[in-house]
Amino acid sequence: MSRESHAAGDTGPATPAPQGSAQAYVPAEAAPQDAAPPAVTSGESHAAHDTTRTEIPDEPAAAPGQPHPVPAPPAAQGAPAQPTTAPGTHTLAAQDAPAEPTTAVGTRPQETPAATTTVVGTDTTPTGAAPPAASATEQGTAEPDADADRRESRSADPEQALATTRWRLHPETLREEAPDPPALREIRDGLTTKLGSALDNRSRARLLSLRSVASRILGDLDDALADARLALTYAEATGELRRTALARARLAEVLRWRGEHAEADRLFAEANSAELPDRLRAVLHEHAGRSCYDQGRLTEACLHFERALDLRQGEDPELNARTSLALDAVAERAATGGFGPKPRSRETVLGGERHPVPTFDEEQELWGYADAEGELVIAHRYAEVQPFREGLAWVRRPEASRWALIDTTGAALIEANNGYRAVGSFSEGLSWVSMDGKGRWMAVDRTNIVKIPPGYEDVRPFRGGLAAVRQNGGWGAVDRTGQVMVPTRYHGLTTALADGRYVDGFSEDGLAVVELAGRRGVVDRAGRVLVAPAYPTLVVHPVAFLVGDESGRWGALDRRGERLIEPVHPSRAAVVAEIDRLLADSTPVL
């Protein structure tokens, strides 16, 4: 089988880069990061605090002043208006804005004593602040009534209250249970109140999906399902990877509780992108494992639990405790019913069609295609073939110098007499083809309709609606209509990711590394320059940009392109470890 006429793949080579209690309490997994941080209550100014620690949210907050669509106010009961897609208003640079203050880290702190703040979402007093006044009880006055805690919960921000709720994980069903259902209902009511004033897609997605969590754990699965589905619609309208992943996972967990496991498993698989933070990926694997447990797919469940632990490398004691409890449940069930069917591939879970694969006949020296069982389904009659992509494959017969397009039955959709000497696999419904095999690339659909006219010297497959193209010696990007989104002015457009992969063009989060005169920067899918090309090395991290200088020192920028970590670290791994330390010490609520 020949290699394709040009690089059609998305990835490049890798670069160096106790027993659980049956009644254990499981903390809710994350403070919603869009919520405002708690106010400073010690009476000190912000300047008096140690600003060398800048926390980075896992679920990004909307940037201050960022434009959002403003539809009519939602109904009083909290049902939001229909989602509004806002092309051109999605600013990826701001979506990972760290909580204030934003002083760069990596420099030496002041020698004078400074109060230190705690993780956002906790309710402790900063170190060095004056202790709180004695309570009424301590002063000898009447004790608070039995509902004091509930009133305090009602007055607190419902998102923060949900984040600090501690669930019980049932040792047999592996479902969360609310220790105080009335308090959880009050939290849900608070989320409904906040929905009444939520006017942007990000807030609607977050609040609806969190309300679905509360309804699910309260057993109101119909309400939870309605909220979760609408939340996913809003999240997809934002175009943000992590927000969409969270909404998918929360919907998947509702479906799991309803017994609709096929869709739940598919959503968990769709949500779990390699470009997400490891702590979020670990939680997604954990919950996918619980869904497999429900179905008796115990080996597959264990693989998910193992992957979750690997991603956190033993540094998450709460995940360790939950996993220990889950593995005890697996062992007990396996002892009576076995470990169930063999694990499925990700492709099988996603429900994609299994296409025939190329097979070579050494006697005839010709290529054909076989099904998953190895049975020949398309005869050996081609001198060169490409793998099936989107149910289509380019093939060339021995007597022809040009390529033809076939479907999975072997029927020709585009004949060789159309004259394509070079072709690229289909991606997002389009294939790049060249008449002379050297340049003047154009994009056609499966019916051979030209969607983007010829004129490009080199091209890459479409990814996330955009394709990298070279014209007049410069690289840029076009959308599926041929509109230029990134001007063809750069010397390179290959994106290095923190997990060691390279992608030709844009990441799933809509970011691309561009090169100009040996210096690298970042653009978003609208062509906006987030980081000017100024760094010898730049890597896209799930919540930041890792940058290296000429001396081999590493630092990091936030998603707005502002300095987050000074370039003082000797390796990229050291910067990643520093970023992990800066991340709020929590995981998302699922």
Image (cartoon, helix red, strand yellow):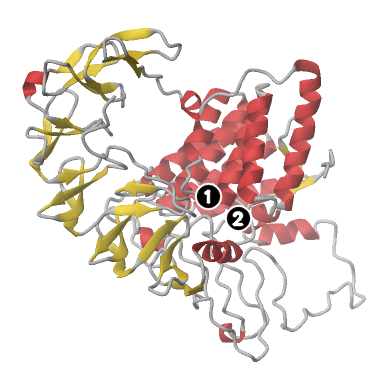
Residue at 48% over, 54% down: 16
- Determine the image quadrant of residue 406: top left
Mark 2: give few (<14), some (14-19) or many (20+) Cα within 10 Å: many
Decide: is 588 above or below 549. Answer: above
Q: Is residue 172 visible?
A: no
Residue at the far bottom in the pictured view: 112
Decide: is 388 above or below 52. Answer: above
> Do labels 2 and 1 touch, CB within 8 Å?
yes
Residue for badge 2: 159
Left or right of 580 in this view: 86: left
Q: Which mark is residue 305?
A: none
Residue at 65% over, 22% down: 295
Q: Secondary structure at mark 1?
A: helix
In x, y percent, where is residue 179? 78, 45
- At label 1, the amino acid type is Leu
- Determine the image quadrant of residue 411: top left
Residue at 51% over, 70% down: 570
Count of numbered circles in the view = 2
In x, y percent, where is residue 218? 69, 38
User: In front here: 208 or 459?
Assistant: 459
Residue for badge 1: 207
Mark 1: give few (<14), some (14-19) or many (20+) Cα within 10 Å: many
Q: Is residue 499 visible?
A: yes
